[in-house]
Amino acid sequence: MSVGGRGGPDRSESFGEELLGLILDRAHELPPHLIGPLVAETVARMGGRVPQVLLQDYGQKQLVPLPGAGGAAGDPQPIDRSEAGRCFLESRTVEVQAPEGIRVHLPLLDGGDQVGVLSVALDEIDDDTRRLLRRIAGLAAELLQTKNGYTDLFFRTRRSEPMSVAAEIQWSLLPPLSMVMPHVAVAGVLEPAYSVAGDSFDYALNGETLHLAMVDAMGHGLDAATMATVAIGAYRHARRISIELSEIYLFMDRAVAEQFDPDHFVTAQMMRLDTDTGRLQWVNAGHPAPMLIRAHHVVRRLDSPTTLPVGFGGDQPQVSTVALEPGDRILCFTDGLIEEHESGQEQFGEERLIDWVNQLEQADHGIRTVARDLSHTLMRARHEATSDDATLVLFEWRG
């Protein structure tokens, strides 16, 4: 250990600490619109130039530059056809030669959720520089998440087309689209991103237990968004008072029945995973059966006794159980994913869904990339036709 002049520990500020301190010392009272300039100032002190903070758009197709980032604004970059997109999809640093020097793209990660990408140019790079850039990117991601509740700036940046009021409600209701932890990972996608209404999902990792729910409210527009909000709110309340899975269904059922007419309902699926043992429990209230993916292949549907949709006054449901193996993935989805069809044509169907899952799984990507690719692939296979919300949630027990 280094020592100071009086024999104690050396508490003098190193260059790296000075850089990180520049962000930390200002973070508490930093207005959201100054995050970009602060990051630009920080990387400039280590020789970084033309920095960009790139945020994922709501359709998960582009990385959009944050305005006022203190560097080059630039145009949105396609996630599927750019080096910044490769960094985003693979959650790793990507370095490329560029006219302005070495362009370094770093993932902006927060709890496994991918906020976007920090991009900066340098004349040269070594391991010390890489370490500092990773830590700066980590702090920038935390700031973006923390300040998000105080501003519309990030929302406006991520919105690449007009969004319906119902979709605004749903996006404000959602947890982060992905979470990656040592024992478990979760990723979800909602389509159509800018007009989704009745579909939603929620999850929480409480200790060693992952809680997850998916809902699909009948109808479209604000009525559906309002019902989904009540259903998710009731689910969260029941989950937080730690009642059993079957009782959570009853709680949600009463909440919807008390607020809406008798012919209004919400299909739902509630799950609980013990991340220590891999024991999965679930209740199905009108959703398609989830699929179990093992060794990159769909091996079975998780068929189970179903109960009435939420709001119809069903009896206390039977809880189903399955033992997962390390690496198993579960795909949950709403009926909009498989019931879409062109006029006069057959529905998309589960068999075609399974075929696409098996093809995408062979690439051995992380679940965030697989969920996104699956959603976009299915949209293309349906010729971009969307008459209903289509939502999928993929999670993996890592053992």
Image (tube, rainbow, N blue to C red):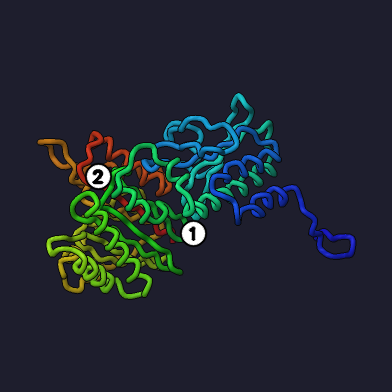
Residue 127 visible here: yes
In the rendered view, tell whether residue 198 sits above or below residue 104.
below
Q: What label sits on residue 182 in the rendered view?
A: 1
Give the residue at the far right of this rendering: 5
130 lies left or right of 281? right
| Residue name at image x 52 percent, y 38 percent | 67
**Residue 268 coordinates in the image, percent (x, y):** 24, 61
Q: Residue at x 60, y 37 (%)?
A: 70
**Between residues 55 and 8, which one lies in front from this camera angle?**
55
Q: Position of residue 230 (x, y in %)?
A: 28, 63
- Pointer 2 or 1: first along the chain: 1
Q: Amino acid at mark 2?
A: Leu
Up the image or down, 286 lies above or below 237; here it is: above
* Residue 362 visible, this orientation: no
Eyeballing the image, is 276 above or below 126? below
Q: Nearer the viewer, residue 200 or 255?
A: 255
To which residue does mark 2 refer? 353
Q: Position of residue 104 (x, y in %)?
A: 59, 36
What percent of the width, then of the height, locates residue 84? 50, 36
